[in-house]
Structure formats: structure tokens, C-alpha cells
Image: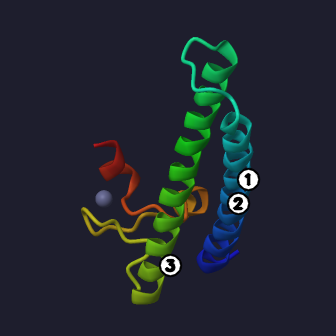
């Protein structure tokens, strides 16, 4: 599979995840809409916790989408697969595992 195809698939999966998470969040918002905002209500606290988790998953998915877009842009300019820090080849294996990687494994670990 080409890097472009892989990024495309990753984007689709991420968009689907984002849509599902957005639906979850809407459901949680509806569930809390008619519950009085009482911090001592254990159910309210659980819902607030779930909502915070969904919100953080949504922002992670959005961040991932931006990484994918950036990788696609680098693919077009020919910069994809080249470490941003040291300029060396990121390597096929690493790109397969993480198509949006911007740095080689050595620079990432450093
Ligand atoms: Zn490097």
C-alpha cells in the first residue's frame, strides 16, 4: 500500500471515529440537559467524567487529522519520509507503522 493510500485510509477511519465521538458527546449533553447541575449527584459526576473523556478523545482525533493533512502536504512536496530534524530517511518500517511520522526514530527518542 502506498503512503498516500495509507494516509487516506487513516483519514477516513479518523473521520468516522470523530463522527461517532461527536454523537456520543451529543448524547451525553442531552443526558445532562435535564439533570440539575449538582456536583454531589453521583450520576452527574459520572456523566461529567465521561463527557470530559469524550472531549479529550475528540481533540486527539482532530490533532491526528491535522497530522495526516500535514503528512499529505509533505508527500506532495517530496518532504514525506525525511526526518524534519536531521534530514535522514525516516525508514519504510516506521512509516508503515506511523505514516504521519515527521522525525526518524533516533530524533524521536532523543
Ligand atoms: Zn532524525
Q: Residue at 54% x, 17% y: name it.
A: 39
Q: Residues within 10 Å of mark 3 (few under 14, many from 20)?
A: many
Classify 79 as above or below 67.
below
Q: Residues within 10 Å of mark 1 (few under 14, many from 20)?
A: few
Q: Residue at 60% x, 20% y: name it.
A: 45
> Foreground: 52 or 37?
37
Classify 85 as above or below 24.
below
Q: Gap between marks 2 and 3, in whole Å? A: 21 Å
Q: Residues within 10 Å of mark 2 (few under 14, many from 20)?
A: few
Classify 3 as above or below 53.
below
Give the residue at mark 3. Answer: 72
Give the residue at mark 2. Answer: 19
Give the residue at mark 1. Answer: 23
Secondary structure of residue under mark 1: helix
| Tag 2–tag 3 contact (CB < 8 Å) | no
Front disc: 2 or 3: 2
Q: Looking at the picture, how far across and down is residue 89, in whole percent?
A: 39, 68
Amino acid at each position: 500500500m502506498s503512503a498516500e493510500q495509507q494516509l487516506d485510509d487513516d483519514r477516513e477511519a479518523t473521520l468516522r471515529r470523530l463522527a461517532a465521538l461527536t454523537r456520543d458527546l451529543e448524547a451525553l449533553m442531552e443526558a445532562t440537559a435535564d439533570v440539575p447541575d449538582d456536583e454531589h449527584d453521583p450520576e452527574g459526576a459520572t456523566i461529567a467524567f465521561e463527557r470530559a473523556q469524550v472531549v479529550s478523545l475528540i481533540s486527539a482525533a482532530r490533532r491526528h487529522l491535522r497530522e495526516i493533512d500535514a503528512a499529505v502536504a509533505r508527500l506532495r512536496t517530496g518532504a514525506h519520509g525525511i526526518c524534519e530534524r536531521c534530514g535522514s530517511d525516516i525508514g519504510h518500517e516506521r512509516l508503515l507503522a506511523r505514516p504521519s511520522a515527521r522525525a526518524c526514530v533516533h530524533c524521536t527518542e532523543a
